[in-house]
Image: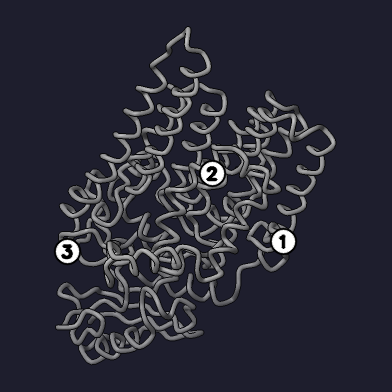
Amino acid sequence: MGWTVTAVFFVLYTVVSVLRNDRMLNAGYDLGIFEQAIRAYAHGRAPVVELKGPGFNLLGDHFHPILALLAPLYRLFPSAVTLLVAQAALMALACFPLTRWAHRAVGPVTGLAVGCGLGASWGLVAGVTKDFHEICFAVPLLAFSVTALGQRRWWAAAAWALPLLLVKEDLGLTLAAIGAYIAWQGVRERRDRPAERRRFPLLLGVAVAILGVAGTAVEILVLLPAMNPRGGFDYWHQMPGETSSTGSLPGLVSMGVHLLWPPMKWLLLFMLAAPTAFLGLRSPLTLLCIPTLAWRLLAGNEHYWQPNFHYNAILMPLVFAGLIDVLHRRPEIVPPHRRRKVLAFSAAFTAVTAAVYPLHDLVLPSAWQTPAHVRTAERLLTRIPDGDTVASSNRLAPMLTGRATVSLVCFGTGPDPAAPTALPADPPRWVVADRNDPTVKTPCPLAQTHRMLRLYRAHGYVQVAEEDGITLLRRP
């Protein structure tokens, strides 16, 4: 059953991801960025990403060397679609261990309900259909690790979790939480079975927890600043304490209020608990969500609080593991008749969210058609030769990153990076901008794009084409 559920969702994820890519719903931020990095790995180079800035090493933005594992596959199939298919496979793989665990521990109906609930969950679907991100590696690693925790296989749980240090710098804190869980269970085992005096789970858990905290500290304080062009960690300013003293009483009160306000954060917490009919909250495995939720809710970036943020994907295996754990270990509070109600509620909630999140693309006729604007973009971009340099708007970028060196059209030089007054130090041969690009705030503000287009024209760039809002310029 586990492999069947995994295969079904792999196909569904792949189809939806490719359909969205064909309709130009992905962007340079982030699909283009990761394709440039993996393309560099595939050719034996450091992951320099021009979409982030001239000569920007992506390992100075986030620490994710695990991306190099995709380099051989990308070398064989050099396309952004390769990243989307790999992401679909990794995300779908998370269904396998949890489906099998639920099947063996509770029964086939529960196994099927959990597998399909996880696969169609809003968090996984939002993550798998939104560009490409490194956290697609974390999702199956956490699924296998938390399954091993539920089955009390401590060494296996630690082994599956250790690679999280290579996925993203903050996931060391989740690794530490897994270590703390193992240590706590080791203490309980020693207390409940003193005759055995088993020390290995306790020592293993402590070691894993220390390694997780130390790994995150080294990555944020040493490795990322060493490879960052600005010599620091770019995301400190989003954490509390930058504008006020968190050590004072008013600062602590302010942080506490900020943790659960505005109401968008309550919606996020509700959306996380509802797929398991709120029953998963009764399992300590759900506490493994705390490290990720803590930094997201404390951050000043409102995108981190939203249910459509791709980082919700790593939380879904944890909340469904909590459900399995309660159904298996607490049968006295979930008798068979109540279990059926819980699974029915979970299925109903998943069905409702599936109608809102991108899985509904599969039944929309418009999702299977290429818009005229996209066909125009494809036709105009064929005028750009392979291997050339291009300054592009955000949504057009991933259509070029597989065959050209691409930067953002709003990049220039001048005393104020937010308002460039001169061309880039190494001007591109081509400039392409889409007036209909919906990403007009980030990464390229509309006014900045218009300013750069005027500068390019003033420096002699000639207009090759302008059609359906897409402008193509070429350097003489």
Instruction: Say if 393 sits above or below 20 in the image.
Output: below
Find residue 230 and name its label.
3
Colouring style: one colour
How far, Cα to Cα, is label 1 from label 2? 20 Å
Local secondary structure at mark 1: loop
Position of residue 453 in the picture relative to residue 322 (left or right) = left
Q: Amino acid at mark 3?
A: Arg
- Please tell me in which quadrant of the rendered image residue 1 appears: top right
Of label 1 and label 2, which has the lower sequence position? 2
Residue 243 at what x, y percent from top left?
Answer: 28, 72
Residue 415 at what x, y percent from top left?
Answer: 14, 83
Comparing 299 with 411, the one in front is 299
**Number of other residues with Cα within 10 Å of mark 1, as a class: few under 14, some 14 to 19, many 20 or more:** few
| Res 75 visible | no
Q: Residue at x 72, y 64 (%)?
A: 364
**Number of other residues with Cα within 10 Å of mark 2, as a class: few under 14, some 14 to 19, many 20 or more:** many
> Disc 1, disc 2: CB below 8 Å?
no
Instruction: Say if 364 sits above or below 121 in the image.
Output: below
Q: Residue at x 37, y 55 (%)?
A: 34
Of label 3 and label 1, which has the lower sequence position? 3
Local secondary structure at mark 2: helix
Q: Amino acid at mark 2?
A: Met
Comparing 170 with 209, the one in front is 209
In the picture of the structure, the residue carrying the numbered disc 1 is: 355
How far, Cα to Cα, is label 3 from label 2? 33 Å
**Quadrant position of the C terminus in the picture:** bottom left
In the picture of the structure, the residue carrying the numbered disc 2 is: 91
Residue 22 at what x, y percent from top left?
Answer: 55, 63
